[in-house]
Image (cartoon, grey):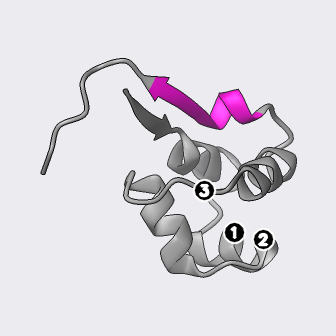
Amino acid sequence: MKLSNNLKVKRFNKNQITQDELAKQLHVSRQTIHAIENGKFNPSVTLALKLAEFFDCQVEEIFYLNMEEQQND
């Protein structure tokens, strides 16, 4: 199982906010947002909750478990 996300879609649906704008709102780096969107970094529970609050949705609407086997790169 792999943690996947809809963060890029959420950003697009919220006035096409950029990674940089979102990062500034959440007090993280743009690289953190980029890494989360690309599945290279799993956010802390605190950051996941901040994202859900920012997008006015439940955490499960942004993050979900992908039941396909995780491939080793």
Residue depicted at x 12% and y 51%: 73
Which image quadrant for residue 25? bottom right
* Residue 21 place in picture, x, y as percent: 68, 75
**Numbered badge on residue 22:** 1
Which callout, 3 or 2, points at the residue further toward the start of the chain? 2
Local crowd size for mark 2, using a 10 Å CA cut-off: few (<14), some (14–19), many (≥20): some
Q: Amino acid at mark 2?
A: Leu
Residue at the limit of the structure toward the left, as seen here: 73
Closer mark to the observer between disc 2 and disc 1: 2
Q: Which residue is mark 2?
A: 26
Front-most of residues 60 and 21: 60
Range of residues picked out in magenta: 59-65
- The quadrant of the rendering that contains the N terminus is top left
Q: Is residue 45 above or below residue 20?
A: above
Left-right relation of 2 to 33:
left
Q: CA distance from mark 2 to mark 1?
A: 6 Å
- Contact check, label 1 and label 3, Cβ < 8 Å: no
Which callout, 1 or 3, points at the residue further toward the start of the chain? 1
Q: Amino acid at mark 1?
A: Leu
Q: Which residue is mark 3?
A: 43
* Residue 29 place in picture, x, y as percent: 60, 81
Q: CA distance from mark 1 to mark 3?
A: 14 Å
- Contact check, label 2 and label 1, Cβ < 8 Å: yes
Front-most of residues 73 and 8: 73
